[in-house]
Image (tube, coloured by chain):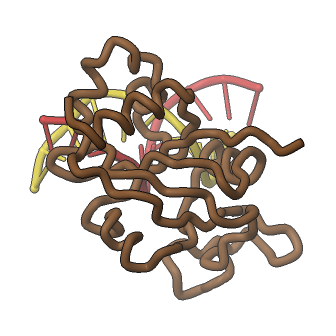
Chain colours: A brown, B yellow, C red
Amino acid sequence: MSRKIQHWLMKSEADVYAIDDLERDGTTPWDGIRNYEARNFMRDRMRPGDLVLYYHSNARPPGVAGVARVASEPYPDPLQFDPGSRYHDPKSSEEEPRWILVDVAFEEKFPRLVPLDEIREHPKLQEMPLLTRKRLSVQPVEPEAFRIIRKLGQRGG
DNA sequence: GCCAACGTTGGC
DNA sequence: GCCAACGTTGGC
Protein backbone atom coordinates (compact mmCIF):
# COMPACT_ATOMS: atom_id res chain seq x y z
CA MET A 1 0.00 0.00 0.00
CA SER A 2 1.41 3.35 -0.99
CA ARG A 3 1.72 6.38 1.20
CA LYS A 4 -0.75 9.22 0.79
CA ILE A 5 0.75 12.29 -0.77
CA GLN A 6 1.11 15.37 1.37
CA HIS A 7 0.78 19.02 0.42
CA TRP A 8 3.23 21.83 1.06
CA LEU A 9 3.94 25.46 0.42
CA MET A 10 7.46 26.64 -0.40
CA LYS A 11 8.51 30.26 -0.70
CA SER A 12 10.97 31.58 -3.21
CA GLU A 13 11.96 35.18 -3.78
CA ALA A 14 10.47 36.02 -7.12
CA ASP A 15 13.52 37.94 -8.33
CA VAL A 16 15.90 35.16 -7.30
CA TYR A 17 14.20 31.99 -8.49
CA ALA A 18 10.67 32.30 -9.83
CA ILE A 19 8.41 29.59 -11.18
CA ASP A 20 9.57 30.45 -14.71
CA ASP A 21 13.09 29.51 -13.65
CA LEU A 22 11.81 26.19 -12.34
CA GLU A 23 9.91 25.58 -15.57
CA ARG A 24 13.08 26.25 -17.55
CA ASP A 25 15.23 24.01 -15.34
CA GLY A 26 12.67 21.25 -14.83
CA THR A 27 14.09 20.28 -11.45
CA THR A 28 16.09 22.13 -8.83
CA PRO A 29 17.58 21.37 -5.41
CA TRP A 30 15.79 23.46 -2.79
CA ASP A 31 19.03 24.66 -1.31
CA GLY A 32 19.83 27.43 1.13
CA ILE A 33 17.17 26.63 3.73
CA ARG A 34 18.71 27.51 7.11
CA ASN A 35 15.72 27.27 9.39
CA TYR A 36 15.31 24.15 11.50
CA GLU A 37 11.56 23.85 11.26
CA ALA A 38 11.65 24.16 7.48
CA ARG A 39 14.48 21.64 7.35
CA ASN A 40 12.57 19.17 9.51
CA PHE A 41 9.62 19.22 7.14
CA MET A 42 11.90 18.42 4.21
CA ARG A 43 13.93 15.84 6.08
CA ASP A 44 11.22 14.04 8.00
CA ARG A 45 7.97 14.40 6.12
CA MET A 46 8.47 15.16 2.42
CA ARG A 47 8.59 12.31 -0.03
CA PRO A 48 8.70 12.13 -3.82
CA GLY A 49 5.34 12.87 -5.38
CA ASP A 50 4.19 15.31 -2.71
CA LEU A 51 2.68 18.46 -4.20
CA VAL A 52 3.92 21.96 -3.45
CA LEU A 53 2.31 25.38 -3.79
CA TYR A 54 5.03 27.57 -5.29
CA TYR A 55 4.90 30.93 -3.52
CA HIS A 56 6.58 34.11 -4.75
CA SER A 57 7.81 36.23 -1.86
CA ASN A 58 9.28 39.71 -2.26
CA ALA A 59 7.03 40.15 -5.25
CA ARG A 60 4.40 42.72 -6.15
CA PRO A 61 2.05 41.29 -5.33
CA PRO A 62 3.29 38.25 -3.40
CA GLY A 63 1.29 35.07 -3.99
CA VAL A 64 1.10 31.49 -5.22
CA ALA A 65 2.36 31.21 -8.78
CA GLY A 66 1.88 27.52 -9.49
CA VAL A 67 2.53 23.96 -8.38
CA ALA A 68 5.72 21.97 -8.01
CA ARG A 69 6.35 18.39 -6.97
CA VAL A 70 8.84 16.83 -4.58
CA ALA A 71 11.24 15.01 -6.86
CA SER A 72 13.79 13.29 -4.63
CA GLU A 73 14.32 11.71 -1.27
CA PRO A 74 15.84 14.08 1.30
CA TYR A 75 19.63 14.48 1.09
CA PRO A 76 22.29 16.87 2.45
CA ASP A 77 22.37 20.40 1.02
CA PRO A 78 25.74 20.54 -0.80
CA LEU A 79 26.13 24.28 -0.22
CA GLN A 80 26.69 23.76 3.51
CA PHE A 81 30.08 22.18 2.67
CA ASP A 82 31.18 24.93 0.25
CA PRO A 83 33.33 27.57 1.96
CA GLY A 84 32.66 29.97 -0.91
CA SER A 85 28.90 29.82 -0.52
CA ARG A 86 26.87 32.20 1.56
CA TYR A 87 25.13 29.05 2.78
CA HIS A 88 28.36 27.50 4.02
CA ASP A 89 28.00 26.11 7.55
CA PRO A 90 31.33 25.53 9.29
CA LYS A 91 29.61 23.59 12.05
CA SER A 92 28.29 21.00 9.62
CA SER A 93 30.23 18.01 8.31
CA GLU A 94 29.79 15.30 5.67
CA GLU A 95 29.54 12.77 8.49
CA GLU A 96 26.89 14.75 10.33
CA PRO A 97 25.23 17.11 7.88
CA ARG A 98 23.02 19.70 9.48
CA TRP A 99 21.01 20.89 6.46
CA ILE A 100 18.83 18.54 4.44
CA LEU A 101 16.89 19.34 1.28
CA VAL A 102 14.80 17.78 -1.45
CA ASP A 103 14.69 18.40 -5.18
CA VAL A 104 11.53 19.95 -6.54
CA ALA A 105 10.22 19.63 -10.09
CA PHE A 106 8.03 21.93 -12.15
CA GLU A 107 4.42 20.80 -12.32
CA GLU A 108 2.29 23.71 -13.51
CA LYS A 109 2.25 27.49 -13.70
CA PHE A 110 -1.11 29.05 -12.91
CA PRO A 111 -2.72 31.21 -15.62
CA ARG A 112 -3.17 33.72 -12.80
CA LEU A 113 -1.18 34.39 -9.63
CA VAL A 114 -3.20 33.85 -6.45
CA PRO A 115 -2.26 36.95 -4.45
CA LEU A 116 -1.58 36.88 -0.72
CA ASP A 117 -4.42 39.36 -0.19
CA GLU A 118 -6.90 36.90 -1.63
CA ILE A 119 -5.65 34.10 0.61
CA ARG A 120 -5.85 36.41 3.59
CA GLU A 121 -9.48 37.22 2.82
CA HIS A 122 -10.66 33.70 2.04
CA PRO A 123 -12.76 32.32 4.92
CA LYS A 124 -11.44 28.76 4.48
CA LEU A 125 -7.78 29.71 4.36
CA GLN A 126 -7.50 31.53 7.67
CA GLU A 127 -5.59 28.72 9.38
CA MET A 128 -2.78 28.55 6.85
CA PRO A 129 0.70 28.91 8.39
CA LEU A 130 1.33 31.32 5.53
CA LEU A 131 -0.86 33.80 7.41
CA THR A 132 0.03 32.88 10.97
CA ARG A 133 3.72 31.94 10.65
CA LYS A 134 5.05 34.79 8.61
CA ARG A 135 8.65 33.67 8.39
CA LEU A 136 8.34 29.95 7.77
CA SER A 137 9.46 29.28 4.21
CA VAL A 138 8.56 25.59 4.02
CA GLN A 139 5.23 24.62 5.51
CA PRO A 140 2.47 22.00 5.34
CA VAL A 141 -0.82 22.77 3.60
CA GLU A 142 -4.16 21.08 4.26
CA PRO A 143 -5.51 19.16 1.24
CA GLU A 144 -8.56 21.40 1.10
CA ALA A 145 -6.50 24.58 1.17
CA PHE A 146 -4.34 23.18 -1.59
CA ARG A 147 -7.39 22.40 -3.70
CA ILE A 148 -8.93 25.83 -3.13
CA ILE A 149 -5.78 27.70 -4.08
CA ARG A 150 -5.12 25.59 -7.15
CA LYS A 151 -8.66 26.18 -8.31
CA LEU A 152 -8.27 29.93 -7.79
CA GLY A 153 -5.08 29.90 -9.82
CA GLN A 154 -6.49 27.79 -12.62
CA ARG A 155 -9.84 29.40 -13.05
CA GLY A 156 -9.70 32.80 -11.47
CA GLY A 157 -11.90 33.94 -8.59
C1' DG B 1 14.24 51.20 1.31
C1' DC B 2 11.94 50.70 5.73
C1' DC B 3 11.07 48.20 9.54
C1' DA B 4 8.19 44.80 12.39
C1' DA B 5 8.25 40.15 13.44
C1' DC B 6 10.68 36.63 14.94
C1' DG B 7 14.32 32.93 14.79
C1' DT B 8 19.19 32.35 16.33
C1' DT B 9 23.36 33.21 18.91
C1' DG B 10 26.18 33.72 22.70
C1' DG B 11 27.42 35.72 27.28
C1' DC B 12 26.49 34.88 31.73
C1' DG C 1 18.59 28.05 30.76
C1' DC C 2 17.66 32.99 30.34
C1' DC C 3 17.39 36.70 27.55
C1' DA C 4 19.51 40.79 25.12
C1' DA C 5 21.61 41.58 20.90
C1' DC C 6 21.74 40.46 16.40
C1' DG C 7 20.47 39.08 11.70
C1' DT C 8 17.03 37.83 8.34
C1' DT C 9 12.48 37.51 6.22
C1' DG C 10 9.24 39.45 3.66
C1' DG C 11 5.16 42.75 3.26
C1' DC C 12 4.53 47.30 2.30
Q: In the rendered image of this protein, does residue C3 appear above or below residue A30?
A: above
State the residue in front, C6 or A151.
A151
State the residue in front, A102 or C4.
A102
Horizontal relation, residue B2 to residue A155: left or right: left
Q: Residue at x 59, y 75 (%)?
A: A88
Residue A134: image location, x then y, percent: 40, 34
Residue B10: image location, x then y, percent: 63, 53
Horizontal relation, residue A79 to residue A118: left or right: right
Query: How many marks do you count on the picture?
Result: 0
Horizontal relation, residue B1 to residue A19: left or right: left
Q: In the rendered image of this protein, does residue A155 appear above or below residue A131?
A: below
Tell me the quarter of the image containing the N terminus of chain A.
top right
Residue A130: image location, x then y, percent: 42, 32
Residue A131 found in image quarter? top left
Residue lying furthest top in this view? A123
Residue A23 found in image quarter? bottom left
Tell me the quarter of the image containing the C terminus of chain A.
top left
State the residue in front, A111 or A13.
A111
Q: Residue at x 49, y 56 (%)?
A: A68
Q: Residue at x 53, y 66 (%)?
A: A105
Q: In the rendered image of this protein, does residue A10 appear above or below residue C4?
A: below
Horizontal relation, residue B1 to residue A82: left or right: left
